[in-house]
Image: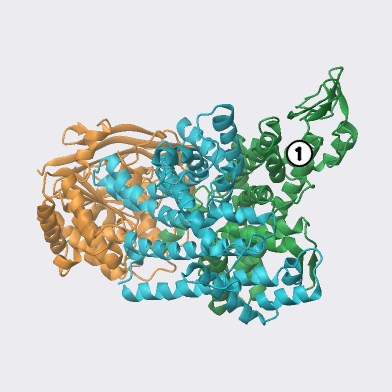
Chain colours: A green, B orange, C cyan
């Protein structure tokens, strides 16, 4: 070690600069890269198409009802007959009745018209329910309600959670403390029980406080309840992310240049959490559809006679022996919808950030 | 002549990725003798870390392709089955990494992690292994090793953690110690201590050291021989004296010029190498440094590019300029004067 | 360490207080209207309503009502005689809510402990297998299965399981609960379907979480260090990757387990007629009978708050970085 060259200092700033340059070689926007990755993931794309098709089908429920099924979601056809493959069939047949010939009262289970597929020219494609209503029509209308509640509550939930997280994460201090404790408080309940409790309490007289008036039985009740109880599930992780962003130089630089808090929040912080929010949003629609189904199943969500996939399963449960399709079909609709959302959300997360830690905790 | 430990011949490493094949290492040759320190210098992405990891088979993957030979004491490590390679790892060739903050498992004590290294390769009892761990910690200069051995990594400072990493690497008396940017994450004052420690332990343990860094200043302290890597290949290779006092490749000049020196007149501006390293997927035609080289001329486009030019001192370089041309151009380059066209 | 425990316990009490206040607000303030009128029946006389109002204390200021409500909930648990209005009772059935919840605990605990063991074991198994085989077809197959698992409404799965395995084929009993003390074999037999049903969602979910944790951990520098030490892959996976990836699973499990113990398995209990705590709450939804739902919600929150304190202690034990010194 006798070489005299040790007077070199350890400065390597230019090399570090070169190292950072390397990152910009690719030089394309992260959204473009994400789209390129997503494009290759055919499972995610197919899932998105499936979900969109389900949405379109449900949106077109009135068209289907009027022009193909020729009935409404709540129209009862208990005594009617339908021509299936040229033969007349009772919508609801059998059942207990008085037999005039033998002069006896015969006790029997009623028989329900099963799925006719396309043999009755669009009527009762998926059979009838216990009141003689067209299951296919109800399935589409029910899907409309389920999707309205699911997507609506996801929108509200994401919006409120992002706002709260921005305010908490950006301001810190006591504001952060209050908002975090609010998250903790909701977090301390079993989510589903809290949703049931709120829905039941609201089902009595609706909500008439703070100038807001919601009637019991309104779709807003499950929508708002679900969005409320799930706020911390998006809000908490986002708050953490924003807190760490807050420490980053580019935020400090923006503040240093005199950008006001609103400007920093919306033009510097928000774009950096946008991908996380997008993934959460997709996945939480799935969660919300499941939650709505559960609430409606217990009678605390969408109220009969209005259909939703959850309450259709609930009423179908009693006829499972005689008409199993009543409970099975709406369940399959839920699984398809939720699965397509989950698969797409998964693909989206992988595409946006291959190493992201975004996930919905329960 | 010291014992020849390692001979790397024509090593190529390629990764298949979504965007195409990455030529991470593209024909690297070097030898390493016992007791020597080899410095590998280059920017990030020059293939120096991949070269080191490949020696230990840590880059093995279904998307990785290897060519060439890594000859360690007569066996080719590239062909060695994983199970046999594991006996080499940590035992005969050990490695320490850049970031001591993340290179130790946070949930086990420092002692446990050293003991794990020992018991993996030697049938030693836990007690005996722990006694050795304490002794190793003492040797790397950790004060109060009897109690520190039971501390968790987060209770160590950065420099201490790197010392502990070195202790762990030395626990089985390896022939070769690979240090990948061992000082990059540390404070300047700690850097010097760690380098000094490495050099002292090399002598004590009679092993060879491969020191990988992007910082010529680091190798200047301890290396016997220096490889300068660029875009997966060696652009210059020679003894420390050669590389520092008679550098042949314009890239090396650039590296030297970007370090402020006290023994030279103050440069007009601190030199920086213009441009960015090439993408390892679409390499430039001819000399890979050509697009950034201020002295490039027609010959630099030629394929195949110049193989390592050998002169009598064992000083190799990969530049088409003649030695005289180089000597004329380099001082102005290093001194940071305006671009001179050859 | 002691200071940490004490701090945590004080926090726990504070959260419990806030929780009970929120429950009170939800049930007394949100519905609005006059609960006395609702309780008085179809054609009440004004005296009748006034009477109920006075007896239940609906005319008192809300903080007095809050204290009364908590008192009543507590009285339901304490031995000794209490008068009709000193105990939190169902509006509909007039049953003691606390006593009814207590009655449901054996069924709920039987369901949840069994299901918890199943979902933890299989969740870890699924996570490890798909992480080790990441990218291969077996990982893809497991991923799709896990996603299907978390995409199924649990009550629908329950109905389907009952229909196919207890009704069309009578391999399993068609719902119901047999106490362990009465007949252990029947207890087990009755619980197999519900256990599986409740566990499926969690298996899928834990498997996915663990998989992504493990893939993240595999990229950590210390795993590379372990490999560079020459440690065999199995040990690297177990000692370094899995050990560190399981830490977040512990907190997930603690909270999920608390939620199902606290009545969160309401759908599974309802579908399989397991007369547990959740089932009890579900029975009250139809009649908009608030006190039982209120009681179960409080009971559930109690479990979550207590378990999250346990989770914090466990975390401190498992992760030396956050261990208080």
**As rendered, which of A322 and B144 lies closer to the eye?**
A322
Relative image position of residue A283 (x, y in whole percent): 61, 49
| Disc 1 target residue | A139
Above or below residue B201? Residue A164 is: below
Above or below residue A167? Residue B112 is: above
Say whether residue B269 is left or right of residue B262: right
Neighbour tally class for label 1: few under 14, some 14-19, many 20 plus, Cα within 10 Å: many
- Name the residue located 58 percent from the left edge and 68 percent from the top edge: C88
Identify the image quadrant of the N terminus of chain B.
top left
Say whether residue A324 is left or right of residue C165: right
Say whether residue A298 is left or right of residue B7: right
- Name the residue located 47 percent from the left edge and 57 percent from the top edge: C258
**As rendered, which of B9 and A276 lies closer to the eye?**
A276
Q: Is residue A195 visible?
A: yes
**As rendered, which of B131 and C119 lies closer to the eye?**
C119
Say whether residue B72 is left or right of residue C254: left
- Name the residue located 79 percent from the left edge and 39 percent from the top edge: A138
């Amino acid at each position: 070690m006798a070489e005299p060259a040790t007077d070199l200092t350890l400065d390597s700033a230019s090399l570090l600069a070169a190292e950072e340059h390397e990152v910009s070689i690719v030089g394309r926007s992260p959204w473009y890269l994400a789209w390129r990755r997503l494009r290759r993931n055919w499972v995610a794309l197919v899932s998105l198409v499936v979900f969109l098709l389900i949405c379109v089908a449900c949106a077109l429920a009135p068209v289907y009802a009027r022009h193909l099924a020729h009935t409404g979601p709540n129209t009862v056809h208990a005594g009617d007959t339908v021509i299936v493959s040229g033969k007349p069939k009772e919508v609801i047949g059998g059942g207990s009745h008085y037999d005039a010939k033998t002069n006896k009262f015969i006790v029997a289970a009623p028989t329900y018209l099963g799925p006719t597929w396309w043999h009755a020219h669009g009527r009762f494609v998926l059979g009838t329910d216990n009141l003689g209503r067209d299951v296919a029509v109800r399935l589409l209308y029910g899907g409309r309600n389920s999707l309205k509640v699911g997507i609506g509550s996801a929108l509200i939930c994401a919006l409120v959670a992002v706002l709260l997280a921005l305010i908490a994460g950006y301001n810190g201090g006591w504001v952060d403390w209050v908002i975090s404790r609010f998250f903790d408080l909701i977090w301390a309940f079993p989510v589903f029980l809290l949703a049931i409790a709120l829905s039941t309490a609201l089902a009595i007289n609706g909500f008439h406080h703070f100038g807001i008036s919601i009637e019991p039985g309104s779709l807003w009740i499950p929508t708002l309840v679900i969005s409320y109880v799930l706020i911390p599930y998006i809000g908490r992780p986002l708050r953490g992310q924003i807190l760490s962003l807050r420490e980053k130089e580019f935020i400090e630089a923006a503040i240093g240049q005199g950008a006001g808090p609103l400007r920093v929040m919306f033009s510097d912080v928000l774009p950096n959490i946008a991908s996380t929010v997008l993934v959460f949003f997709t996945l939480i629609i799935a969660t919300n559809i499941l939650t709505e189904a559960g609430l409606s199943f217990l009678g605390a969500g969408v109220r009969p006679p209005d259909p939703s996939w959850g309450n259709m399963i609930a009423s179908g449960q009693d006829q499972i022996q005689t008409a199993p399709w009543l409970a099975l079909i709406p369940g399959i609709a839920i699984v398809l919808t939720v699965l397509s959302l989950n698969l797409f959300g998964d693909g989206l997360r992988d595409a946006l950030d291959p190493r992201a830690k975004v996930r919905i905790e329960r | 002549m010291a014992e020849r430990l390692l001979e790397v011949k024509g090593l190529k490493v390629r990764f298949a990725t979504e965007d195409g094949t990455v030529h991470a290492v593209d024909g690297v040759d070097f030898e390493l003798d016992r007791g020597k320190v080899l410095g590998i210098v280059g920017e990030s992405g020059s293939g120096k870390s991949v070269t080191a990891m490949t020696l230990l088979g840590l880059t093995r993957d279904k998307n990785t392709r290897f060519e060439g030979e890594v000859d360690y004491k007569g066996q080719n490590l590239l062909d060695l089955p994983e199970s046999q390679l594991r006996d080499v790892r940590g035992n005969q060739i050990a490695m320490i990494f850049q970031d001591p903050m993340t290179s130790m498992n946070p949930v086990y004590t420092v002692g446990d992690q050293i003991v794990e290294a020992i018991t993996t390769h030697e049938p030693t009892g836990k007690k005996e292994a722990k006694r050795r761990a304490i002794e190793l910690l003492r040797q790397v200069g950790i004060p109060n090793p009897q109690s520190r051995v039971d501390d968790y990594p987060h209770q160590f400072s950065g420099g201490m953690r790197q010392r502990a990493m070195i202790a762990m690497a030395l626990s089985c008396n390896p022939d070769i110690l690979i240090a990948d940017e061992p000082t990059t994450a540390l404070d300047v004052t700690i850097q010097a201590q760690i380098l000094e420690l490495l050099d002292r332990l090399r002598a004590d343990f009679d092993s060879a050291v491969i020191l990988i860094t992007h910082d010529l200043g680091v190798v200047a302290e301890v290396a016997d021989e220096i490889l300068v890597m660029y875009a997966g290949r060696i652009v210059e290779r020679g003894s420390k004296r050669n590389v520092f006092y008679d550098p042949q490749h314009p890239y090396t000049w650039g590296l030297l010029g970007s370090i402020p020196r006290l023994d030279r007149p103050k440069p007009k501006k601190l030199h920086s190498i213009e441009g960015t390293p090439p993408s390892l997927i679409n390499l430039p035609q001819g000399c890979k440094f050509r697009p950034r080289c201020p002295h490039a001329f027609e010959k630099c486009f030629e394929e195949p590019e110049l193989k390592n030019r050998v002169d009598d001192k064992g000083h190799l370089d990969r530049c088409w300029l003649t030695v005289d041309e180089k000597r004329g151009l380099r001082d102005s380059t290093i001194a940071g004067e305006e671009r001179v066209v050859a | 360490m002691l200071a940490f425990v004490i701090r945590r316990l004080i926090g726990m009490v504070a959260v419990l207080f806030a929780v009970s206040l929120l429950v009170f607000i939800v049930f007394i303030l949100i519905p609005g209207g006059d609960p006395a009128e609702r309780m008085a029946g179809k054609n009440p006389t004004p005296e009748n309503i006034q009477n109920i109002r006075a007896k239940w204390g609906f005319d008192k200021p809300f903080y007095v009502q809050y204290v009364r409500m908590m008192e009543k909930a507590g009285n339901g648990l304490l031995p000794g005689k209490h008068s009709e209005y000193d105990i939190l009772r169902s509006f509909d059935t007039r049953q003691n809510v606390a006593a009814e919840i207590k009655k449901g605990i054996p069924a709920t605990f039987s369901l949840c402990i069994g299901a918890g063991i199943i979902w933890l074991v299989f969740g870890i198994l699924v996570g490890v297998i798909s992480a080790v085989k990441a990218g291969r077809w077996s990982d893809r197959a497991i991923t799709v299965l896990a996603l299907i698992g978390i995409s199924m409404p649990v009550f629908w799965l329950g109905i389907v399981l009952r229909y196919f395995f207890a009704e069309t084929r009578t391999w399993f009993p068609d719902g119901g609960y047999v106490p362990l003390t009465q007949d252990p074999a029947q207890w087990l037999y009755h619980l197999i379907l519900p256990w599986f049903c409740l566990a499926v969602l969690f298996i899928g979910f834990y498997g996915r979480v663990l998989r992504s944790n493990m893939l993240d951990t595999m990229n950590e520098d210390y795993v590379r260090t372990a490999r560079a030490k020459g440690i065999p892959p199995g040990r690297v996976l177990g000692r370094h990757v899995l050990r560190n990836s399981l830490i977040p699973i512990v907190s997930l499990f603690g909270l999920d387990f608390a939620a199902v113990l606290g009545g969160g398995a309401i759908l599974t209990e309802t579908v399989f007629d397991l007369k547990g705590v959740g089932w009890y709450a579900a029975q009250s939804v139809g009649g908009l009978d608030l006190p039982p739902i209120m009681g179960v919600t409080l009971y559930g929150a109690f479990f979550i708050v207590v378990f999250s304190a346990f989770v914090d202690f466990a975390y401190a034990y498992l992760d030396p970085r956050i261990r208080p010194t």
